[in-house]
Structure formats: C-alpha cells, structure tokens
Image (cartoon, grey):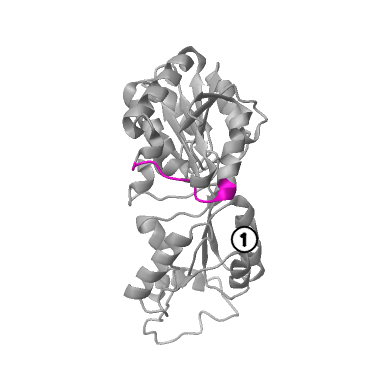
Amino acid sequence: MVPQSEYAPATSRLLSHLIGRYFPREVVTVVEGGADTAERLLELDWDFIFFTGSKRVGKIVHQKAAERTVPVVLELGGKNPCIIDETGVTKEHVHQIVWGKFLNAGQSCIAPDTVYVQEAVFPQFLEMARESIRPFYGNDSEKSADFGRIVSQNHFDRLVGYLEEGRVYSGGRHKREEHFLEPTLLTEVDPKSRVLQDEIFGPDLPVVPYADLDGLLNELNAKPSPLVTYFFSREETVAQKAAHRLRSGAFSFNQVIRHAAASHLPFGGVGASGFGRYHGKAGFDTFTYQKVQYMQKPFNGSTVQYPPYKASQLGWLKKLRKYLF
C-alpha cells in the first residue's frame, strides 16, 4: 500500500497510473486522498508501516502503530545545518551548497537548511553564494527550466512570510499566482525567528555567522537532531571532531545530497528526524524479519535432560551439547 500526499496530486496520479500498469493490485496499491483517508488507513492491521513526512504527522502514525504493536520506520526531515569553517569557503564548496539548497526549489528533506559560516569569511561566503546562483539559474530564475515552483499555496505563503524575518541579501522576488519564489539568501536573522526554528523546505536560505566552533556545536546539539549535518573545511581533523560531537542521521563532509544517492549506504534519521534505516541491504533488512526454524537432529533419547539432575552428569552434557545443537 502506497498512500500519497494530497499536496502533490500530479505526482500521485502519475504513480497511481504507473504502478497500476506494472504491478497487480494485490502486490502494490496506490491510495490517493487527504488526512481523512490517512486516518482510516491507520486503523487497519498492518504488518509494517513506513512513513515519510512531518514530525507532527509522524507522531500520530507512531502512536497509532503502537496501539497495534506494528513496527514502523519514520523519516521526518528536520533542520539540516551546514557548517563552514574559516578554511572551507572555496568556489567548489559554495557551488555544492547552492546546488544542494536550491535543488527542487529547496523542497528536499536533506537540503541544507541553515548555513553557519565562520565570521572571518562570512562576507566572502555571501558574495560567492550570490554569484553562484546566476550561472545555475540565469539572471531571472523564473525563466529557468531548472528551477521549480512551490508545491502548494499554503507552503508558498509560509515561505514568503520568512522573508520578513531577516534582511534579504539576495533574491526574495516572488509571484503568488505562480507559486514562484526565487533563490533567496537571508542575513541578520533573529535566533528566535520561525525561519531558524521551523524546517524551511523551500528556497529561503538563512546564513548565520559564528565566532567559535565549539560554541556552535554546543548550540546545535541543544536542538532536535537532523537527518544530516553538512561540514565544509580543508581540515579533516576539524570535521572529524564535529562528526563525533554532533548527533544526526548522517554526517557529510565537503558535499551535500549525494550521500543519500549512494544505494549501499543506509539512510535515515535519529531522534526528532525519525528512526530506522533503508536503501540497499539496510532496506532489505528493515522490511524483513528473521524467522527461526529449528529441527532436532536424530537422537536416541536420554533421560539426562530431565530432572532430577546429578552433578556427575554435567561433564557428559557439556561434551554432548555440540551434537545436540
């Protein structure tokens, strides 16, 4: 059973058509509908539930599954931090971050959510990031065939609202009727603002300076654990230090997004970003369970296994054990 989000009706219809064309209904079925449909599905007796979505809905799924002791995997996203130290601002690194953030107009669960830049290279990063957007999407990203639109009106309004919570360093232009919001860099953002608390899931990119890496790591560890932490530096030992200290589903050094495309690597969150792993063998292990089958080897029988027991029998049983099991 593959339930689909009501926020992406075109994708839902396409999946329903393709899966119905190639798979029998009793093997895979696509279910379309809104929250009411999802609630009814959760009342059924499933063997296993895999859910991708928001933390709010994930908690509901988890609670309903627990009532029936149904195992679950939750992939809930989160605010993926991207950290750049004073050695990490290079043309290639900035290209990586800009590409990963604005891929699918930022609507990716593993997109860099907020970029934390060492204050000594903060102005340099901002300028390089702004200059990296243009070769990807041209002078007018609205006309780019490679830049998408926001999935729904509600999401669009939320993302545009974030623009009021900082200074628009680059971008910010939007058209409500087309669900278009251009790639946007935000600075001077209040730490308590929604854009630094909510998962963005769109093309708003807050860029925040930091002075001390240890202090930043402590600050991030006090937040809910994300799906992935990105770290950019020329110093591998510094990155390893951050990897050991930070809690997240994955830690990616000097690249974004691509770790999720490696089929041999397990993928998933931890804590607030979910639990369970899939992709490759991890996915096979997740969706199966070990069933033990035991068969007694031929044995002439003995009363030794039954009480009452004698101390003299212990040594004999130790020798016999390897033939019994």
Name the quadrant containing residue 42: bottom right
Of 18 and 117, which appears nearest the observer?
18
Disc 1 is placed on an element classified as helix
Q: Nearer the viewer, residue 66 or 189?
A: 189
Q: Quick one: 208 or 182, which is closer to the camera?
A: 182
Residue 31 at what x, y percent from top left?
A: 50, 71
Please state the horizontal and vertical placement of residue 179, each as a whole percent of the image.
50, 45
Q: Please provide percent x and percent y for residue 36.
A: 63, 68
| Amino acid found under the numbered disc labelled 1 | His
Instruction: In the displayed orientation, state which residue is furthest to the front.
Output: 177
Give yes or no for residue 203 being in the magenta stretch: no
Q: Is residue 94 above or below residue 118?
A: below
In screen coordinates, is 148 left or right of 276? left
Find disc 1 in the rendering and name its residue: 62
Q: For residue 324, say whether it is visible.
A: yes
Q: How many marks?
A: 1
Q: Quadrant of residue 72?
A: bottom right
Q: Residue visible at 42% across and 37% down?
A: 102
Using residue 193 as the reference point, say whether residue 187 is left or right of it: left
Could you say which is closer to the camera, residue 94 or residue 222?
94
Residue 318, image x, y percentages: 44, 68
Range shown magenta: 145-155
Residue 215 sits in which quadrant? top right
Q: Residue furthest top?
A: 120
Of helix, strand and loop, which mostly describes the magenta segment? loop
Task: Say above or below: 167 vs 144.
Answer: above
Q: Is residue 154 magenta?
A: yes
